[in-house]
Amino acid sequence: MIDELHEEKLKDLEEKAVKARELVIETLVEAGSGHTAGPLGMTDIFVAFYFHILNHKPENPFWEERDRLVLSNGHICPIQYVTMAMAGYFPIAELKTLRKVNSRLQGHPHRSSLPGLETTSGPLGEGISQSIGMALAAKMDGKNHHIYCLTSDGEHQEGNTWEAMMMAPRYKLDNLCVVIDRNNIQIDGFTENVMPLEPLHDKYRAFNWHVIDVDGNNIHEFVDAVKQANSTHQQPTVIIAHTVPGKGVSFMENRFEWHGMPPDTSEVLGAPPKGEQAKKALLELKMIRETTKNQHK
């Protein structure tokens, strides 16, 4: 059962989201490589999961009754690492080891390296299938935990995704909730130019899923959608979360060029010069933090 999201808790989550975005920028700059747009866009959703939705125990990551959070598009793992560290799975200082030799924080999540990760991801399109296995196993074992699968819109260009979409309704996996990061970008451009996905909502409905469209950068709206998913019976649910890639940093928002590039490594049209990008990004996030505090006051 997910707790009610009262005003004080919402304020706390929104402030955590700003902090998480700052840590993503700092972590990527330290690594000198990695993805920026997706992690910033999905920050609100990860914060909602790790600090409000998930039934989990960071001090006991192998707790059998925990909810499972599967990250299919593993390249956005910087935000998963950041929120896991903030939640207490490992020290925040360890974020500085991202993508470094012998680090537990690899460029794509490696399950056996870091307790708290449910899967190893990298090849796109596998997460929904993996999550179906977990959901089916939970049903067979009489367990009540939920399986949440985070996936990208670009992954829906993979055939494996559509096979999984057929299977979940076949077994009426109402303990499965898939969240699509509908940010409309991928490494080569905009999804609708590379390989159109629309009408995505109608396609999932045709496969007999319960479909919810939400603003993925609105924490309250997203939490309500997950509650609705958890109260849906005899059907899996997909939440199409419309997010802004690069959210919170003006020169990154809705720019596919930042899909797989960290700050301060390249010149990008319309962005500050290399060496000034992280500084500008952190300054903008600081301003958002102050605005968030004033709004709640």
Image (cartoon, helix red, strand yellow):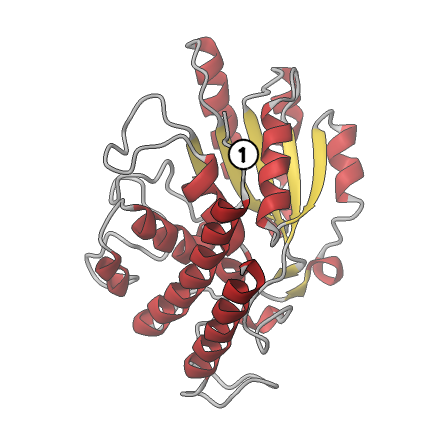
> Which residue, as the protein is rendered here, is positioned at the far front?
297
- The answer to which of 82 and 200 lies nearer the viewer is 82
Q: Considering depth in this image, is 186 or 160 the residue closer to the camera? A: 186
Which quadrant of the structure image shows residue 115? Answer: top left
Task: Give coordinates of residue 260: x percent, y percent.
Answer: 49, 66
Q: Which residue is mark 1?
A: 4
Residue at x 50%, y 30% (from the top left corner): 2
What residue is shown at x 24% (from left), y 62% (from top)? 97
Q: Nearer the viewer, residue 282 or 278?
A: 282
36 or 108, which lies in front?
A: 36
Specify the farthest residue to the left: 102
Residue 108 in sight: no
Q: Position of residue 239 (x, y in %)?
A: 64, 39
Q: Residues within 10 Å of mark 1 (few under 14, many from 20)?
A: few
Q: Secondary structure at mark 1?
A: loop
Is residue 42 visible from the viewing direction of this image?
Answer: yes
Which x, y percent locates residue 270?
61, 86
Q: Is residue 22 left or right of residue 101?
A: right
Left/right placement of residue 101 relative to residue 267 reads left
Q: Amino acid at mark 1?
A: Glu
Residue drawn at point x = 19 percent, y = 57 percent:
102
Residue shown at 24% from the left, 32% from the top = 60
**Where in the figure is residue 113, as x and y percent of width and height?**
24, 44
Q: Height in image: 8 above or below 178? A: below
